[in-house]
Image (tube, rainbow, N blue to C red):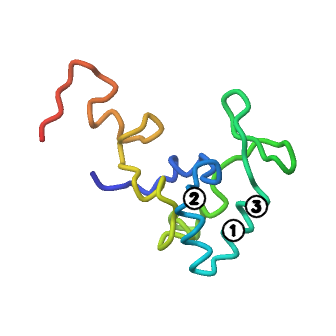
Amino acid sequence: MECLRCGRCCLADFTAYATEEDIRRWKAEGRDDILEVLERGQAFWEGDRLMSRESGTPLAGCRFFAFDGERYFCAIHETRPAVCRLYEPGSSEICPQHSRLGKGNPRKKIRG
């Protein structure tokens, strides 16, 4: 299933999901821009929301989620974290294509 590029999956702040492997890769690539965001924006879960350790305020989306006036895009797509690379459109209820896969309807079968 092709991504609609709506950005709903980017509303979660990836800093809570970046792996040690992602961090090692960004260090090797010299991506201080990403590493700085991770350091500044470290997140923790409080109830059902991600909160900034630095400010204590709710985090509202990935810092690298961008809009160019016509479409949404990932500003670090070429080196995005594993959680983003492995995400499959429609695999989560946050995705507008979720119901197309039949995940919301237990009677509907997915044909492969």
Amino acid type at circle 3 is Glu
Q: Is residue 31 left or right of residue 101?
A: right
Query: Whole-percent x and y of residue 14?
Result: 60, 53
Based on the displayed image, in which of its 4 quarters is residue 93 positioned?
A: top left
Q: Please say if 107 is above or below 30.
A: above
Query: Which residue, as the protein is rendered here, is positioned at the far right?
Result: 55
User: For the residues marked 3 and 2, what is the alpha-carbon distance in whole angstroms?
Assistant: 13 Å
Instruction: Report the residue at 42% width, 59% height from top.
Output: 85
User: For the residues marked 1 and 2, what is the alpha-carbon distance in whole angstroms?
Assistant: 12 Å
Q: Is residue 112 left or right of residue 13?
A: left
Which residue is label 1 attached to? 35
Mark 1, secondary structure of its residue: helix
| Neighbourhood count class around disc 2 (C-alpha, 10 Å): few under 14, some 14–19, many 20 upward | few
Location of the C terminus by quadrant is: top left
Q: Is residue 27 left or right of residue 108?
A: right
Foreground tag (3 vs 2): 2
Q: Please say if 48 is above or below 19.
A: above
Foreground tag (1 vs 2): 2
Instruction: Report the residue at 58% width, 55% height from top.
Output: 18
The mark found on residue 39 in the picture is 3
Q: Given contact means CB atoms under 8 Å apart, are the residues at marks 3 and 2 in contact?
A: no
Label whose residue precedes the other's in the sequence (3 or 2): 2
Based on the displayed image, in which of its 4 quarters is residue 107 positioned?
A: top left
Amino acid type at circle 2 is Glu
Q: Please say if 10 is above or below 107.
A: below
Query: Whole-percent x and y of residue 55?
Result: 87, 48
Query: Whole-percent x and y of residue 52?
Result: 78, 47
Q: Given contact means CB atoms under 8 Å apart, are the residues at marks 3 and 1 in contact?
A: yes
Mark 2, secondary structure of its residue: helix
Query: Which residue, as the protein is rendered here, is positioned at the far left?
Result: 112
The mark found on residue 20 in the picture is 2
